[in-house]
Image: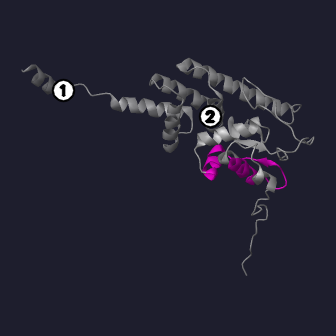
Amino acid sequence: MRDTIQDKNVVPFLQLGHDVIDETTQFDNANEKLAYIVIKRHATNGTRNAFPSLTTIAEKVGCSKRTAIRCVQSLVDKGLLIRLKQFDPDTKRYHSNQYTIPKFVPSDTQSLPSDIMSPPSDTVAPELYSFKDDDEENIQKQQEQKQAFLHIQDIYTKAGWGYPNGIITEQLLQDIQDYGKDIVGFAIETAAMNNARSYRYTQKLYNDWEQKGYTDLATIKRAIAASKQRKVPAPPSPDRDSFLLGE
């Protein structure tokens, strides 16, 4: 008799209150409301924490990644989500954001419950917020993330694109999380050398490197160097010189 293994960790449905569906003020548009629902759908059982990537949010909402970024930023600004960047000190990489979903309060409710918290604003490196500010490890992660962003922001401005706006800042933070600050910095420098006019050019580079399986900066640089060597034209042969000189 074959044993049957059942995974009971995943609830096959989402409990969504009528107040979210009926809300007409707090969400700017349908995409934003659906992004909120998608993130809520990914919440770990028994908690209000979810870890979907921006790519996953975009796919399930049915919108572009850029639209998903705007929706998430708007939800964070309104206090409907609390976002925390996830940094792995072992791999030195950022993982998918952690989203904490406060208790939803309809816009027609006058007083807010005490368990609703809004993250403080940070104009230099946004959303470096954690519930455990007294936790040394979390503070260290926040500082490392902030330094990584400031490093990339400096490279970005030197590329001649000015200071990144809110949408670009969110994209930079996500790309640092996905690819690491070294690759992001190199991509910006490469884009600037190719006279790119915006950060959008780097997305082509990331996609190309990812498709070719380049996961670290050293591999990317070796591949570029090898490509340049292949493109160097061979010197003309003596017979060809003679022909060109009419000899």
Spatial CA span between label 1 and label 2 = 51 Å
Question: How many dots with numbers?
Answer: 2
The numbered dot on residue 171 is 2
Compared to 44, does 206 lie above or below? above
Q: Which of these two is toward me, 51 or 94?
A: 51
x 87%, y 33%: residue: 135
Q: Which residues are magenta?
A: 33-61
How many other residues sit within 10 Å of disc 2, few (<14), some (14-19) or many (≥20)? many
Compared to 114, does 221 lie above or below? above
The numbered dot on residue 158 is none
Q: In the rendered view of the protein, which quadrant contains the C terminus? A: top left
Magenta stretch holds residue 128: no
Residue designated by label 1: 237
Q: Amino acid at mark 2?
A: Gln
Compared to 153, does 71 lie above or below? below
Residue 74 x, y percent position in the rendering: 71, 37
Colouring scheme applied when the structure was drawn: one colour
Residue occupying the far left of the picture: 247
Q: In the rendered view of the protein, which quadrant contains the N terminus? A: bottom right
User: Dividing the picture into quarters, in which one does residue 75 lie?
Assistant: top right
User: Dividing the picture into quarters, in which one does residue 29 lie?
Assistant: top right
> SS class of the residue under badge 2?
helix
Would residue 12 be found to the left or right of residue 133 on screen? left
User: Dividing the picture into quarters, in which one does residue 177 lie?
Assistant: top right
x 46%, y 22%: residue: 193
